[in-house]
Image (cartoon, rainbow, N blue to C red):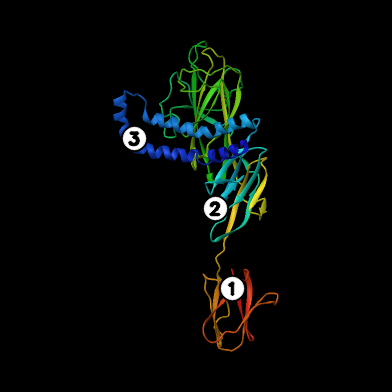
Amino acid sequence: YRNRFIDLASIHLSSTFHPDRTIHIMDSIAGKIENQIVRHKNRWWLSQNFDSEISKMKSFANQRPDYMLKHISDMYLRSVPVKTINISSNNVKANYLFNDQKLIDNQIELNSFQGRNFKIEAGNISGYTFKHWEVYGNSNNVSIVSKNENWKYFDENNKPASFWTLSSYNDNAWKTGNAPLGYGGLGHTTTIGYGTSSSNKYPTAYFRKKFSISDLANKDIFQITVYVDDGAVVFVNGQEVGRANMASGTISHTGFATTCNNGVYTTFDVPKTILKEGTNQLAVEVHQCTANSSDLIMDLEMSCKESLEKPAEIWENAVYSGVLNDAFRLKAIYEDNSTSISLTNLNESLVNLYPTLVDDYFCIENASGMPVKIINISGMTLLKRQCDSNKEKVMLNNIQKGVYIVMVGDKSFKVIKR
């Protein structure tokens, strides 16, 4: 029962509760009720901002799968890391079983756990034959944002506008400098301000940086590692993606980090769903632990995995199984099993062949009086029959795909069954 629960949870957190799906549902419902919100706020004396509450729900939706996977790992699997199996196909009708449980999507980034046994089976598709799996190994690491890069920063004793995390925010008036940014004795490159009192420093500093992504479709497993003293909240394209040494709930400009430290590294995943092709926006707010803290620092790097172009293995069995040690990618290849027949050297004086591209036969009109034979390329006769001058069907349904010769007396015709 436990294994079935883990497998089903992995499937649904990767599909039913995937941020793409849940956020799409939120947007569709929000658009229908938005015009009614003002009336209900007035009726029930509510003060919450509708867009702000929707943003919180989207942040929750983005973070829920990772949180739940970590909880499952901690509870049942001794905190093993999550590993991703990317499953796709050249056929939009493709379907699969994962450990005998049905996957609902024809393309899925399935998050499971390191060390788990897995079995992935390609399903049947009417009109198509499963040919093989293309198996791709580990992806290449790609750096998106490196340490020591240039950032914009705001070091005043107030919070910027509420939409400061969005790419549309105008930060032309912000200062610039290379990371690490901060003050004190932690090895910063750019010194930022903290006010006029060393015993009552500004509690929060704000940082922004644009970054670019190309070929997003072939990139996966986006991660950010932030180096910070004392705490930080990190946003990508306006969505919160992680916190380092900060309490849960709403964080204000005057809020402090939960504990003091001398610089800590924290890594978290960035949902691919919030990224876009081209220019994206990073935003980081860094909080002191106390007003008289002696130092502050911030640096950040971001990376991803880039899919390999050539498969490392071709697996012809519809079932692919093993032990999940690292992330990999599978692509199910199907081919159309409908038959088409190509004929060459047509319209000899006494024998005419009439090809068809859809059915499992060809037609022959034979005025020679000679029997019709079909032989394979090894010379073996597969079919022999007498055909008269009337147009008749010669069925090929019992003949495998390949190249054959139709013999009528000393006349020959090449037939290709596809």
Question: What crowding class fits label 3: few (fewer than 14 Cα within 10 Å), some (14-19), or many (20 or more)?
Answer: few
Residue 148, placed above or below residue 394:
above
| Residue 253 place in picture, x, y as percent | 45, 20
| Residue 393 place in picture, x, y as percent | 54, 78
Residue 15, placed above or below residue 170:
below
From this viewpoint, is residue 308 visible? no
Query: Mark 1 and 2 residues: CB-CB less than 8 Å, in contact?
Result: no
161 or 47, which is in the foreground? 47
Q: Which mark is residue 396?
A: 1
Of the numbered discs 2 and 3, the one sitting upstream in the chain is 3
Q: Which mark is residue 34?
A: 3
Distance between mark 2 and mark 3 Cα atoms: 38 Å
Dot 1 falls on a residue whose secondary structure is loop
Residue that mark 2 sits on: 94
From this viewpoint, is residue 195 visible? yes
Judge left or right: residue 30 versus residue 216. left
Q: Quadrant of residue 362?
A: bottom right
